[in-house]
Each structure stands twice: as C-alpha cells, then as structure tokens.
Image (tube, rainbow, N blue to C red):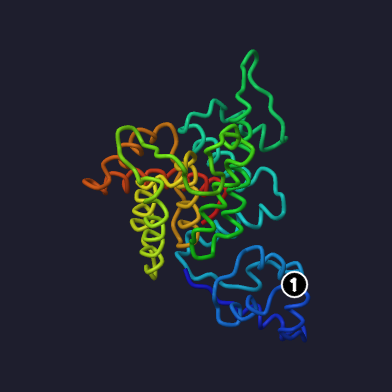
Amino acid sequence: MTISYSRLFDLLKKRGLNKTALRIGASISTVTLARLSSNKEVSLNVLGRICDFLNCQIEDVCEFIPDKQIAPLLLRLVQEMEAGTKGGIYHQFQIVMTYNSNHIEGSKLTEDETRYIFETFSLLGEEGKLVPLNDAIETIHHFACIKYVLAHALEPLNEAHIKELHRILKEGTKDAALSYFRVGEYKALPNAVGNRRVATPSETPARMKSLLSSYAKLEAPTFADIVDFHAKFESIHPFQDGNGRVGRLIMLKECLKNGFLPVIIDEELKLFYYRGLSEYDEKPGYLISTCEAGQDKTQILCQYFQVE
C-alpha cells in the first residue's frame, strides 16, 4: 500500500494555512510533519487529529493506493469506529472477529453474549449458565485490541505493536496474576503447542527479531507472505499465553495495511487452521488455502454492508 498526502497540502493552501498552523492546530510533532511531507505512513490517530483540526474526512487529506477492494473497508472501519456508529460493519466486524478468535481458543461465551458485551458493556448469560469472568475480560480486551489495530493499521509492523497487543489482551486477566506470567513481554517459561516444540524463552527474542527483520525487507508483502509470518510467529509462540489471538490480530493489521481481505477463522475452519499450522513446513499451501476460506467470510460482511 502506498499513500499520498497531496490532498492535505492542497486543502491547507485553499484555506490559507501553512505547515506550522497544521503542526500546532493538530498537535503533531515536527517529525510527523516531515513524514507527511514525504508521503510516509503515520498513524490513524494522527490523521484523526488532522481531520478534527480541519473539520474534514480522512479521504479529504490523504489518498490510499492499495488494492482498491480493501481501501474502502479500512476507511469505513476507522470512520465508524471514530463516529461510534451502531449497527454498521465496524460493529459487526468487532463481534464476529472477537467471538471467533476467542471461541477457537476455548472461550465459553456465545456469539450473542459477545454481542451483548460489545453493545452494552455488561453481561447477560443464558439462564443458569455460569460465565467465566476471564472470558468476559478477554472479550472486552479483544475489542480494544481491534481498535488498536485500526489506529495503527498503516504503520510498519514492529515489536512494540506485538507486545502492546499482548498487554491489552492479557492485562487484568487471571493469567496476569501468576508470578511467572509476563504481560506484554515474552515468555519466562518454556511452552508447547500440542506435541510441537516451539522457541525456548532464551531463543525467543532473537527469533522474533529475525522474523520481523525478514518481514520488514518485503517491499510489498503478498497474502502468502502475511500467512507465512503468522505461521512462523505461532511456531515461535513468544508469549506464555495468548499467542493465537495476538497472531491473528497481527494478521488482521497486515491484511488491512497491504490491501487484502482480513481472515475470520471460525468453528468451521478451526481444525483445518490448526492442521495448517502444524503441517506448515511441509505443506504451506494448506494453511494459505484455509486462510483464503477465512477471507471469504469477511467478503460476505463486505457485500452485506456494501463495502466494495
């Protein structure tokens, strides 16, 4: 994805404003102003402040040049998130993504219960059902993770993003109270995925640095590249717990950034997804095909809400 801020500077000229007025009015740094001037990516939080200052929409200040199918989705999600729109694609995307990502990791909440939490910030369980408090906390936190992803969607992926997603997801959970559990930091104790060996705590920092370095060298990651990063991230399993959800949030961010439909892994795809991860080294196409099937589920949402 490339981006141009020529619309922003044209708008400033029309209104008789200079760059200093923009910097002060939108509360941005000189470094950020330099990034805008050279058409480098800035966070959506920055773009939001600029739009507030100029009383305009994001599309009035920048032009995204990615796969045209996805640019409208990212813009719609951000606009509806910032406006607090109810009943739109952002509303439904939050519920569907959060429910499915938590559900395949063992959450006992139903999709209706997930929806109720998102819409009312309260929990109404089915009659006689005991709802694990941890599931509710992680659901609320996953909503916040998606907001974080959208706010930072256009930024190059880095270690700080990954650790912050883990911190948001796991802070205040029962895991966070454990003496060995590191919220927002890599694992302290060895862990495993089934019978598969993953990185040891001592190996994890170097392997994560290598993975991020290799990925950063890709000028225009393909969908297969994003799935490859996901598979390698899960093979490292850098955190004590929460790796699957953090990994899928990273995949969401990179799909939105690079112009691909996000992936929804639901109960129907769960076994295929885990098989694809376990067999990735020998059969990478299996996981890629499963993730493509997950894209089809997002496409249904886009069609319903007329996001083309």
Q: Which of the pair 97/167 is nearer the observer?
A: 167
Name of the residue lying farthest toward the top: 128
Q: Secondary structure at mark 1?
A: loop
Taking the image as shown, residue 307 lies to the left or right of residue 211, namely right
Q: Is residue 253 above or below residue 125?
A: below
Residue 194, image quadrant: top left
Q: Position of residue 111 (x, y in %)?
A: 57, 30
Which quarter of the figure has residue 297?
A: top left
Left or right placement of residue 19 versus residue 299 in this view: right
The x and y percentages for residue 202 are: 39, 50
Residue located beneath label 1 in the image: 26
Counting from the top left corner in percent of width and height, residue 275 is at 30, 37
For the point 53% across and 65% down, the residue is 155
Report x, y in % for residue 17: 76, 84
In the rendered view, tell whether residue 184 sits above or below residue 45.
above
- Farthest left residue in view: 282
Q: What residue is rendered at 34% in x and 53% in y? A: 228
**Within-10-Å neighbours for mark 1: few <14, some 14–19, many 20+:** some
Q: Is residue 44 left or right of residue 282?
A: right
Asked if residue 105 is positioned above or below residue 36 in the image, the reply reads above
Relative depth, front residue between 182 and 302:
182
Which residue: 55% across, 76% down? 4
Residue kind at label 1, given as amino acid type: Ala
Give the side of residue 117 with respect to residue 166, left or right. Answer: right
Choose top left, top right, bottom left or bottom right for residue 267. top left
Camera-side residue: 180 or 53?
180
Q: Residue at x 77, y 81 (%)?
A: 21
Number of disc labels = 1
